[in-house]
Amino acid sequence: MIQQTAREFARKELAPVAIEANEKGVFPDEIFKQLGALGFMGMMLPEEYGGVHLGSFCLALALEEVSAVCASTGVTMSVHNSLTNMTILKYGSETLRKRYLPRLASGEILGAYAITESEAGSDVAAMRLSASRKGSDYILNGTKIFISTGDRAGAIIVFGRTDPKDRTRGISAFVVEPSFDGFSIGKTEKKMGLKASTTVELVFEDCRVPAENLLGQEGAGMKIALAGLDGGRIGIAAQSVGIAQAALEEALRYSRERKQFNSRVIDFQSTRWKIADMATAIEASRLLMYRAARGRDAGEAVSKEASMAKLFASRTANQVVFDALQMHGGVGYTEDFLIERLFRDARVTELYEGTSEIQRLVISRAVIEEFERTIPD
Amino acid sequence: MKIVALLKRVPDTEARILINQEGSGIKDEGIKYVINTYDEYAVEEGLRLKEKTGGDSKVTVVCMGPEEATELIRTALAMGADDAVHICDKLLERPDPFTTASVLAKAITLEGFDVIFCGKQAIDDDMAQVHSIMAEMLDIPQVSVVTGFEIAPDQKTATARRRIEGGDEKVETSIPAVISCEKGLNEPRYASLPGIMKAKKKEIRKKTLADLGFGAVPGEARSAILRWVPLPKSAGCTMVQAEEMRDAVKQVVRLLREEAKVL
């Protein structure tokens, strides 16, 4: 029923908005208020903070449905739910939870999550943004880049360096509000896809953050960042499955109508083989994603599974949009057909929330460790 | 107020309907079932009336249908209805409108009612009879195909709007009444996630014919569907072209006589 509500909302309310938002590159503010009213912006938060107290699995189902209609909305929703909300819930003091979570859950404010810097992408510990304690404040100096929803968020989780010497244990996490002194929005990226989401630079110039906005202990930043990864990756896997499913459906719709050589394109064997491969890869991706989400809900350690789901689903999404566009022929290359947007939107799934290369690193490390544990000393 | 919303489980409007081999009904495989579209307006209007009247107002969903209808009843509960009665009996597999109306009237009488909302028709068999027969059985007024509804402050009367050619008709009715709902009455809300969670704990009272005090299927054999037959494939269309209308008519008459053999 949750999936049903997500699907109906996405197809009836989001779809018409998404067309214009993606064409003109505008952020659909109103959609998130509506999603909030239905409970989709606080899916995993407890009721006492205005949430619905569902698990990763339900969030993934909803993200798949929303992303199938608008991948931009999917990523905004994913970052908000699995990164911002869950980090504040897990590591925020009761004061912080009460201050931010109910407003995040209702969709009144949006969440963002800022790790990436120009020199710190996959190599998170290379970050340099400094956070030094001064009386009852921390003073932040530096720049974050590629921050999804950064210019729309009311609560941003920012990772900064409280100890310049300790590479991993010198990082701390804070909740930053855009109204804080010394905070400003820098460059807005012009992206290949996801045009209805925003990706911006955040600039901190002697930005004063009250010490009570520290998440967890000073120095716990790396641990907090790593804890958020699995949920974020399952979210992007779900987004990838949504994009791929939408692309397959578009290709089926078009190739049923299109006739060449007195035959429908869908009846050519070359098309049929593509359809079979696409559908099989999508189903496999979906099951990997379900497996990781269910495991996470059961409290298992699912880093390997989350990475596998993300790696496979994002690869699948890119392969499927490629084949689906091929099935369209030349018209698929025009903006008149939805596949053109899906093609562009799919690309980033192999880049953010850990590149495919990083996922392979995580997976191979886990596989080798598991194997070595079976070898007697 | 005791508000009742009727609900029927019907095939999705987008489902491809095929008749089964025996001609006794439609092929069930692969068909998605949904709440009858017009009943969604009924549930929504019930919820709005409850929100307006407040106090101890309550919306009860009443559904006659197979086991599988439970899922759709839950959806109505997730939208915000308070509880539900689900009349589910093997003997009621193929009821005619008279039977359905008899059963629903009985169930609603046992529940108690002030306003009964229902769809103007079900989108499966399009009979559009049940609400009228039921209103007669309950001996209360009915306003059908309603696009606007407003309860009076004293809750003893209500005004309803009906679309007629060139305008609207305003009808005043005493309460209790049966109101059959038309598209345009409202925009049904989505089942929210908190609503879905709450719906799990709401009560659905399952009833059989015996539970309602019936010894046999009421009103049976007033009408029965003997056989379902697919529409014959249309032969296609012949376009008649001529300079003069007079010649075109001649051609059409000739075709009607010689080809179609209807003259």
Image: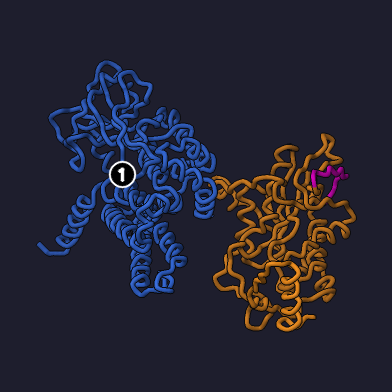
Picture colour for chain B: orange
Residue projecting furthest to the left: A377
* Residue B76 appears in the picture as rendered: yes
Residue A315, position in %: x, y? 28, 57
Residue projecting furthest to the front: B243
**Residue in view at x 62 percent, y 66 percent:** B68
Q: Give the quadrant of residue B259.
A: bottom right
Residue B167, position in %: x, y? 80, 43
**Residue in view at x 9 percent, y 61 percent:** A377
Residue A156, position in %: x, y? 35, 31
Instruction: Judge by depth and name the residue closer to the eye, B201 or A162.
Output: A162
Q: Quadrant of the N terminus of chain A?
A: bottom right
In this image, A133 relative to A41: left or right? left
**Does A239 appear in magenta?**
no
Amino acid of disc 1: Met
Where is B167 relative to A157, above or below? below
Where is A109 relative to B113, above or below? above
Residue that mark 1 sits on: A192
Tag 1, which secondary structure? loop
**Residue in view at x 50 percent, y 46 percent:** A14
Q: Give the quadrant of residue A281.
A: bottom left
Q: Give the quadrant of residue A137.
A: top left
* Residue A285 appears in the picture as rendered: no
Residue A129, position in %: x, y? 21, 28
Picture colour for chain A: blue
**Residue in view at x 35 percent, y 32 percent:** A150
Region of the chain picked out in magenta, as a range: B166-178
Q: To which chain does the residue with label 1 belong? A: A
**Does B169 appear in magenta?**
yes
